[in-house]
Amino acid sequence: MVSEMSYLPRVWLGSQISQRLLPTKMRPLSAHVKLTENCQAKCISCNYWQTRWEDGITTNRAISLINEIAAAGIHSLRFTGGEPLLRTDFFDILRQAETQSFKQIIVQTNGLLLKKLHNEVNASPITDVAVSIDGLKETNDLIRGIRGYFDLGLEGIRLLQGKKVVLSVTLNRMSAKELERLAAVAKEAGASVQYNILSESLPFLKDADMAAMWPQQSEVEEITRFLRETLKRPAYEVDYISRYYRQQEISEPPCVLGYLQVFVLSNGDVMTGCYPLKPVGNILRDKLENILASEEYRLQSEAMLRRECPGCTCGIESSLAMKHAVSGAFFELRRLAGRFAADKKVARPPKAETHLSSGASNG
Ligand SMILES: C[S@@+](CC[C@H](N)C(=O)[O-])C[C@H]1O[C@@H](n2cnc3c(N)ncnc32)[C@H](O)[C@@H]1O
Ligand code: SF4
Ligand code: SF4
């Protein structure tokens, strides 16, 4: 097992100073699992729902996969999709898997089934529920393509007990002027707000309606004000997002996601925390442990640091925080992780078990 104390500092040293200093063994901090990529919504920003996907991971393989993720020392597990709550065996899987060692089990959901399934969610080991809502009622329902989505999602949220709830908001043109009021709605429902940056470069977002969604000058100003004043995001991050939406030149940080996250798709493919690059293995053929230990995993993660990739905005908060670490962003990494426990022995660098989640997750 890689020393928890040394992993993150070595990712920082290796990504910012010299690749020779990188950890020799991969130990991502979080695993994102898609047990299904089917979806019942009709979002204009995403086209998962337009395909009928084959769920390749059986109930038993899902259970053993979760056990393998725990055994790999990964403390944060995120279920995403598609719509994860569409898997009818989802709660059976959670009941039968060894989930005790996870510090966080997050379900990233469109929220449409929360009202129906709230008892199961409440009784499950899920710690966090992230519900995608992109604007106030009318705007949200237009973006997500389902009339009644907003009300149903909020109804579901109000039935949750003992879970940390966040609204995942994809920052866009149509709801830019509603963000303050949306944050107030979230607060009233006991939820906080995390954001996604609108992306057009992910494979599953091709053909999404970007013209309707992409913010113009005045909306970019609303968005940046919201990030700075309401969400209190660090200045370097607000600046990045502002430049991104204005389509200005950006100095991209090394992408550290290969070291922080591992993705498993519904066909079993394993990705190095990156959707656009190629899979490096498949859990239907191999154990996760072997894939994480493979040369292919390590080499692709190193190439990601050098940005040998098409580029995307996934997890940009983590990569920016790493880049700005010397100016105090290790604190920010901990804040992203939601863990403030001071480590008296290691004064500055983050503890390796800290979970660097990217606010909301567009994966
Ligand atoms: C692909 S969805 C999968 C999980 C679930 N179906 C949901 O909507 O929360 C993951 C996240 O990506 C976000 N998303 C959708 N379209 C996006 C886009 N074009 N750019 C960035 N994020 C997007 C969603 O709003 C959601 O928060
Ligand atoms: S964003 Fe989520 S809810 Fe919307 S179509 Fe994509 S997978 Fe479905
Ligand atoms: S920035 Fe590049 S390497 Fe990082 S996740 Fe996106 S496409 Fe992959």
Image (spheres, rainbow, N blue to C red):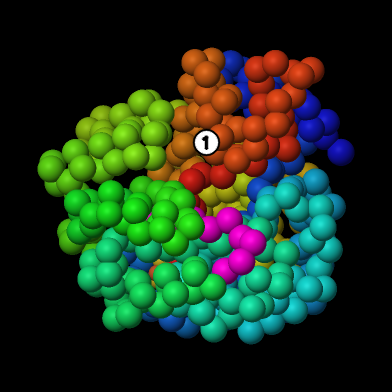
Q: Which residues are magenta?
A: 160-169
Please tell me in which quarter of the rendered image ligand 1 is found: bottom left
- In the rendered image, the quadrant that contains the N terminus is top right
Magenta portion: prevailing SS class: strand
The answer to whether residue 282 shows anywhere in this view is yes
Judged left or right of residue 208, residue 279 is right
Could you say where residue 64 lies in the image, as x and y percent from the top left?
Answer: 81, 67
Residue appearing at x 54%, y 15% in the figure: 326
Residue on which the image places disc 1: 318
Q: Is residue 152 above or below residue 291?
A: below
Query: Foreground residue, 308 or 224?
Result: 224
Q: Amino acid at mark 1?
A: Ser
Q: Quadrant of residue 33?
A: bottom right
Residue 357, by quadrant, is: top right
In the displayed structure, 264 sits above or below 156; it is above
Instruction: Give above or below for 24 relative to 66.
Output: above
Residue at the location (60% across, 40% down)?
A: 337
Does the magenta portion include 326?
no
Q: Nearer the viewer, residue 12 or 268?
A: 12
Quick check: 246 left or right of 349? left
The local secondary structure at tag 1 comes to: helix
Mark 1 crowdedness (10 Å alpha carbons): few <14, some 14-19, many ≥20: many
